[in-house]
Amino acid sequence: MPSQSDASTTAVQSRFNDGAYLARNPQWHEGDAAWKAQQVVDMLERHQLRPRSICDVGCGTGAVLEHLRAALPADVKLVGFEPSDAARAISHAGVPIRPGSLPPPEERFDVMLLLDVFEHVEDYIGFLREASGRADRFIFHIPLDLSVQTVLRMTPLLSTRAKVGHLHYFSRETARATLADAGFVVVDADFTRGGIELPTLGRKQRLAALPRRAMARVSPALAARVLGGFSLLVLAVPSAPAGDGPAGA
């Protein structure tokens, strides 16, 4: 019988290996990689973490790891895991990228990155539970697709599903509840402002960034809930270390 990991890998491969995703996203989001890497670096520095090994699960072409390689000490072990043959085929990363959805059970990392990942996975709770035993700490970046305007209009949710393959949609509250259901404890969480800051925003997205920016000055949480365009950056552990507790957004 196939393992849960095999089932997850098969589901992801079938969705991202038929050429449709690459046709819609020919650079596989490499233009956002420097921005994402900076969010990771900021979270590590905020908690004075000095990991000796980091894996990026669902790393795409490995571009985030490339930027991390420039920002972190040279002796930090960086490894990517990517189930899509198409993404690995166009990668020019100077870090190892292995096929598969997760590291093997016998290999453990100090930090696992899951940046814009589990919203693509059919059994996302099972996937997260399986991932929880492969690292000491986890950094998640979770798109907050659910907002007042996306639910009222509905088109943005359907567009996100068609273009980038989101199968599940989250608010801040449901994202945190998902991590709790999967056995994680949130150590820190904060909003990121991709809908305002990403260098790859198109003309319509730049126009939408104007009211988002104005509302975020008053309350990022309100802006995320009403207008969208935000994600949640989370530092989590499978069980709470002494002295750590839920914090942040």
Image: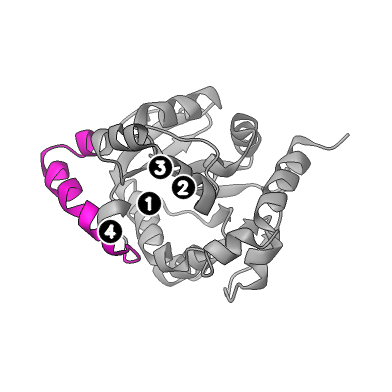
State the residue at coordinates (39%, 66%). 34
Q: Which is nearer the N-term, disc 4 or disc 3?
A: 3
Q: Which residue is mark 3?
A: 155
Left or right position of 249 against 185:
left
Nearest the viewer among 188 and 162 is 162
Marking on residue 44: 1
State the separation of the CA atoms marked 1 and 4.
33 Å
Neighbor class of circle 4 (other Cα within 10 Å; few <14, some 14-19, many 20+) is: few
Predominant secondary structure in magenta? helix
Nearest the viewer among 152 and 142 is 152
Indicate whether 175 appears above or below 80. Answer: above
Which percent across, then down, holds residue 196?
25, 55
How many marks overall?
A: 4
Q: Which residue is mark 2?
A: 160
Asked which quadrant contains residue 70, the reply is bottom left
**Is mark 4 in CB contact (under 8 Å) with mark 3?**
no
State the residue at coordinates (49%, 70%). 66
* Position of the N terminus by quadrant: top right
State the separation of the CA atoms marked 3 and 2.
9 Å
Q: Which is nearer the N-term, disc 1 or disc 3?
A: 1
Q: Magenta stretch: give its range.
A: 199-223
**Residue 163 visible in the displayed image:** yes
State the residue at coordinates (68%, 55%). 83
Q: Secondary structure at mark 4?
A: helix
Q: Which residue is mark 4?
A: 204
